[in-house]
Amino acid sequence: MFVELNPLNPELWPFFLMLVLAGAGAGLLAGMFGIGGGAVLVPVFYQMFGVLGVEEAVRMHLSVGTSIAIIVPTSLRSFFAHQGKGAVDIELLKSFRWAVPIGVIMASLIVAFVSSGVLRVIFACCSLVIAMKMLFGKEGWKLADDIPAGFARYTAGWGIGFFSTLMGIGGGVFNNTFMTAFGRPIHQAVATSSGVGVLISIPGVLGYVLAGWGVAGLPPYSIGYVNLVMVAIIIPVTLLVAPIGVRIAHALKKRSLEIGFGIFLTIVAMRFFASLT
């Protein structure tokens, strides 16, 4: 039985606070690392939908789809801001214009047929990989002096779109890792990741809407696997707090934030693995 998402219900106030903090955390991460914050939003949505009585069978799908929807305006805003400063690698984005969306579409098709447990395993495994990169990655480490062309680049773009869509993230973590591993400066990687977020989020949200169209057990105000109430709550908070998050991030040591984010992702991954037993 669904619990009405009413802001006047005092029992839900702690969870509304959790949503606000999640939006603030997403803004902080976007400012510091060029990522959309889906790694924070998805586990919060998962818990919130559980409190509201959403069935386990669709809860993870709904969490991921709603996270992807929130990335659309934030990635667009970030992309135009970075593009205005000339920091985006437009040539790389153009080479990704088919590879990333194809990965997104393929992931969206898979979502329509996999269980909530499979999505949780994928999210947990990818979160652990990202956490290890945050905790143990070295800034100067790289594979080569420049990004490969041709099939290797196409495959990388496909993988970024595919796995980001299954996780409900904007692809910043994967793209940052890819670009810096091939000698690109981190500021260019962060800027370009905002454009990758656009390539992922727009087809991604359409894919999750279609994948969940007509599925039973979705809460009110849902279009497919996207819940409009959650989107309406989080987007203003994220857009409002993001500039504040940028200033806070620059006032703190980047390494401290990386360690904190890595620990957070490790805990989230362990919780999702535990939920499968």
Image (cartoon, rainbow, N blue to C red):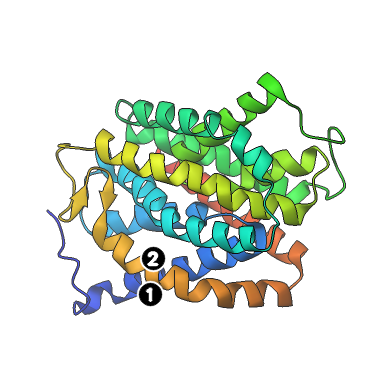
For the residue carrying disc 2, how many other residues have a C-alpha within 10 Å: few (<14), some (14-19), or many (20+)? some
For the question of whether residue 266 can be seen, the reply is no
Q: Is residue 275 left or right of residue 56?
A: right
Res. 249 mark = none
Asked whether disc 1 touches disc 2, contact meaning CB atoms under 8 Å apart, the reply is no
Q: Is residue 115 left or right of residue 10?
A: right
For the question of whether residue 195 can be seen, the reply is yes
- The amino acid on which the numbered mark 2 sits, given as a three-letter code, is Ile
Q: Is residue 26 left or right of residue 88?
A: left
User: Quick one: which residue is furthest to the top in this view?
Assistant: 151
User: Quick one: which residue is furthest to the left in this view?
Assistant: 1
Q: First in sequence: mark 1 or mark 2?
A: 1
For the residue carrying disc 1, how many other residues have a C-alpha within 10 Å: few (<14), some (14-19), or many (20+)? few
The one of 90 and 120 positioned closer to us in this rendering: 90
Residue at x 47% of width, y 28% of height: 102
User: To which residue does mark 2 refer?
Assistant: 235
User: To which residue does mark 1 refer?
Assistant: 17
Callout 1: SS = helix
Image quadrant in which the C terminus is located: top left
Residue at x 66% of width, y 55% of height: 191
The one of 200 and 173 positioned closer to us in this rendering: 200
Q: CA distance from mark 1 to mark 2?
A: 14 Å
